[in-house]
Image (cartoon, grey):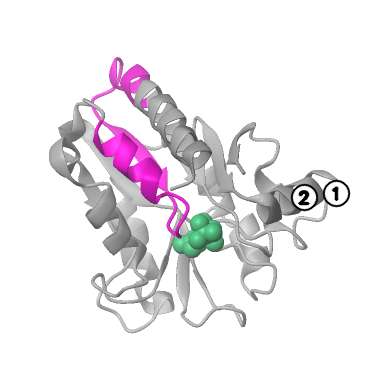
Amino acid sequence: MNTSREHLAHQLAEAVAEALNADLAHQDRALLVVSGGSTPVPFFHALAAKPLPWSRIDVTLADERWVAEDADDSNARLVRKHLLTGNAAAATFVPLTTDDETPEQGAAAVGERLAGLAWPASMVILGMGGDGHTASLFPDSQELALALSTEDTVVAVRTPSQPQARITLSADRLHQAKRHVLHLNGEDKRSKLAAALGGDDVRELPIRAFLACPLAIYWAP
Ligand code: 6PG
């Protein structure tokens, strides 16, 4: 593993642990929202090793593919495998899928499930794709405008560029978090982020919806 990416993962884990501890000093439970994809794996390992009061921490996802929880491309599977290990296994993980066939059918139940959590989230850790998407806010998705404007917690998403239907936290729900981080690696993502910072059209590069949260950028080459 690239050493600077490993360092970055440890620095991010340190910041997340600090934020969770700060919130847990004055609230019973704290909520952490993480992203899937490949970038977060070393961060998950670093965070899982932190001596946190995990039984008071809930973890959910910024978005999910509408697939079985044991499917290779399930973000829930990724989190269970890499984050909910050792002491961190005591955290409560709240998935974004149901047994319904489609996210449109399951979204209301997922919204109800999430309603019981300690919102606003202590921290949201976002990733970004090569097309400037974040969570499942894709530039080519029909539901982008809805996901950017609704006050609902989650939105079912269909995106021509993606093989599976998805479900995503709405931009509103993500915005409400107390702290926002964008975690990304590599030159391609650096240039995409530079392009995002250089303009305003959120529909073109949806990551722009979060640039003024404020957003802490954790980037390594
Ligand atoms: C997901 C997330 C997505 C992810 C980016 C970056 O894939 O589950 O929806 O927003 O954070 O696509 O993915 P990589 O980390 O794999 O580059």
**Residue 6 in view here:** yes
Q: Quadrant of residue 111?
A: bottom left
Q: Provide the secondary structure element on which disc 2 rests.
A: helix
Apparent side of residue 11 relative to residue 115 in the rendered image (left or right): right
| Residue 188 position in % (x across, y down) | 69, 56
The answer to if 37 sits in the magenta stretch is yes
Residue 141 horizontal side relative to residue 79, left or right: right
Quadrant of res 64? bottom left
Instruction: Give the vertical position of 104 relative to 184 (above or below).
Output: below
Instruction: Name the residue at 64% across, 57% down.
Output: 148
The residue pinned by badge 2 equals 196
Q: Residues within 10 Å of mark 1 (few under 14, many from 20)?
A: few
| Kind of residue at badge 1 | Gly
Where does the magenta region start and end?
A: 20-49
* Quadrant of the image occupied by residue 49: top left
| Name of the residue lying farthest toward the right | 199
Q: Residue at x 24, y 50 (%)?
A: 93
Q: Image point 58% across, 48% down: which residue?
A: 185
Q: Are marks 2 and 1 in contact (CB under 8 Å)?
A: yes
Residue at image x 54%, y 37%? 181
Q: Secondary structure at mark 1?
A: loop
